[in-house]
Image (cartoon, helix red, strand yellow):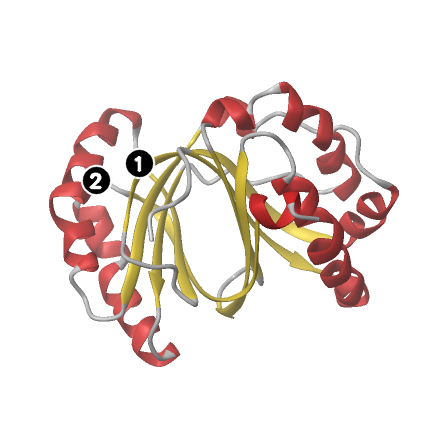
Amino acid sequence: MSLAGEGAVAIWHDIAPEGRADFYAWHGQEHMPERVGIPGFLRGRRYVAIEADLEFFNLYEAQTVEVLKGQDYAARVNAPTPWTLSAVQHFRAVARSICRVAHTAGPAQGGMIATLRYDVPDEQAASHKASLLRGLIPDLLAKPGVAGVHLLTADAEASGVATAEQKARGVANAVPRWVLLLEGWGDEADFVALARAGLGGDRLAALGGEGPFTLGFYRHQITRTRTQWSAG
């Protein structure tokens, strides 16, 4: 399934063991509904690692990147609730990017997602994207069990803004500049094998990508949409 808008916030992180139960309660009951209640936000999803360097992956979809750089979102991330201030202190090793959706395609939302974080030199960006759209992405979409393929590119300036929520976490954000997402609906072992072959670092490097290539595999836990939030 194509992503819901032209902007996205992609977040990877670990959670300290002592904060795990509180994280699950806060994230599902308060944080995700709060986020999709912001004007222009459309959907939020959370995944947990099958095999990855960071345990959780969160994806928030918005109408445009301007929504993610706008006053409504800024006001929210700079006025964290008491529960947010408590919960985010358990975050560890955060990677977060405010992104443009450079390309999105697919017939469905998958129960699993592979995420590839990497870089591309600025002078290679246009040719790299063209190569992905001409070859790698159509090849992946043609594979059995692939639900969607999405390419995100970070807005470095917006991603680098220090918010009150980030300061409360007490850890600096890494900012992945390029992100490829592959969604699937089959068995975990088959999906992981497909993603390893399709998103291998050697293949991306041959198209102008630059490492480190950080590939992780996740299964879906929860989706919140704006309609659900508006309905109460």
Report whether 164 appears left or right of 46. right
Instruction: Kindly identify which numbered label has been placed on residue 97.
Output: none
Is 52 drawn above or below residue 64 in the view shown?
Answer: below
Which residue has dot 1 on it?
120
Which residue has dot 2 on it?
208
| Corner quadrant of residue 101 | top left
Residue 77 in picture, x, y percent from top left: 71, 32
Pointer 2 with pointer 1, Cβ within 8 A? yes
| Corner quadrant of residue 99 | top left
The amino acid pointed to by label 2 is Gly
Q: Residue, x 79% and y 36% (percent of image)?
A: 80
Which residue is the extreme one toward the right?
A: 82
Q: Secondary structure at mark 1?
A: loop
Residue 187 in picture, x, y percent from top left: 35, 80
Report whether 130 appears left or right of 109. left
Q: Residue, x 21% and y 40% (percent of image)?
A: 208
Residue 2 in picture, x, y percent from top left: 33, 47
148 and 152: which is toward the camera: 148
Report whether 4 appears left or right of 14. left
Which residue is the extreme one toward the front?
A: 231
The amino acid pointed to by label 1 is Val
Residues under labels 2 and 1: Cα distance?
A: 7 Å
Residue 226 in picture, x, y percent from top left: 57, 43
